[in-house]
Image: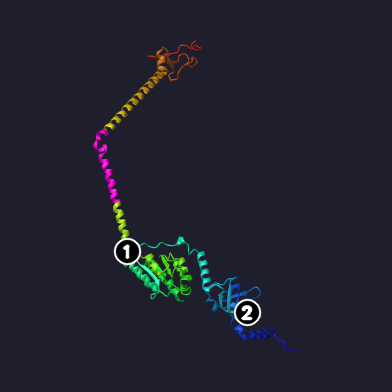
Amino acid sequence: MSNIYTVSDLTRYIKSLFDRDTRLMSVFIKGELSNFKCHYSGHCYFTLKDAGSQIKGVMFKSRAQFLKFEPRDGLKVVAYGQVTVFERDGQYQLYADQLIPDGIGELSIAFNQLKEKLAAEGLFEENRKQKLPLLPKAVGVVTSPTGAALRDIISVAKRRHPGIPLILYPVQVQGVEAPGQIVEAIRTFNRLKTVDVIIAGRGGGSIEELWAFNDEQVVRAIAASVIPVISAVGHQTDYTLADFAADCRAATPSQAAELVVPDVHELKRYIGTLQSMLTTNIRTYIKHRRQVVLQLRDSNVFTQPEKLLAAHRQLIDSYVDRLGEATRKIIVAKQQNLRLNAEKLTVLNPLAVLARGYSLVRAPEGQVINRSDQVTAGQELEIILGQGRLDVEVVRTREGKNGQ
């Protein structure tokens, strides 16, 4: 049999056909991304599909690193590259050099994706934003030294308050080097602490020209700044992610200078108003205090003090009388109670019983004798009378009850 090919030979032949076809060397393919995966090596693998078919695709790190947006499943894109055969698997696939969002700009998608990510981290929350100082000692400016933004800031600041110094940290405001320089400027001001507020910005431009202020590291540096930051990028309709992270957003650099540099003439008028209010308040206070002093001077305490003392004397006399009456009542009550208790003691006094003709018989040991069987004939006893005592000797004893 002739024309028998190995699998490798056939695959290699088919690949050569693909590689010689000029239409497949440089092709644009529109479809929907699916199974997108970014390998740790930096290479990206995906499937591009439509309603009728699909094709495998790969974008190597050398090209993928320049993507401004994050490819996701379901995103419609236009892929540019070469279609050829991957010999190992024997299947054709797209080697992509570019991925362009279909219908939406690449930078617009990147802007929205990063905005969503940083907002979820809380970098744009209002409660973390700082207040601008009323009268800064110095203002830091992060912008291009040759741009119109710097001239506008200087012009407005010197007109409003020439005494507030402006400290410029010159940076590029567009291009590859711009984000790193802006981040370093903000961090340097925070480290040196030579300014009270920072203006970071530039004039207007396209989204590509303003992209340095959408860089993730720039936005994080602004959010992390201890010194309040005013974002002054572009014009009224131009918003960047720096605007959302900054403590205050100004539509133009000129407006940023107006926000941060107080008008010296307005300050003078304000101080004059405060002085006038202070003078008026002091005068009102003194007038009121004077009225109080005059009222005290004309009061009876100073004009007729004897009347006040007379009233108190009368009150004291009344209290003394009431106290004396109460004391007398207490004494009478106590005396009556004392008499009653004395009468009770008199009745209960054993000496009173003896005075009525009774006597008390005791043995020499002090034992009280109240029965005849407690003694024997010949025993000596002591008889206590109402007046005096008798020492006797028992002649005989007789039994009986109740003296019988």
**Residue 280: x %, y % from top left:** 29, 52
Left or right: residue 229 versus residue 113 is left
Above or below, 66 against 398 in this view is below
What segment carries the magenta color? Answer: 281-308
Above or below, 389 against 133 in this view is above
Label 2 packing within 10 angstroms: few (<14), some (14-19), many (20+): some
Is residue 302 inside the magenta stretch? yes
Q: Main secondary structure of the magenta part?
A: helix
Instruction: Give the camera-side residue of 399 and 101.
Output: 101
Instruction: Give the camera-side residue of 365 and 156.
Output: 156
Residue carrying label 1: 264
Above or below, 134 against 23 in this view is above
Q: Quadrant of residue 314?
A: top left
Left or right: residue 279 versus residue 344 is left
The residue at the far top in this view is: 404
Residue carrying label 2: 93
**Residue 325: x %, y % from top left:** 33, 25
The answer to whether residue 196 shows anywhere in this view is no
Residue at 55%, 76% in the rendered image: 64
The type of residue carrying mark 1 is: Val
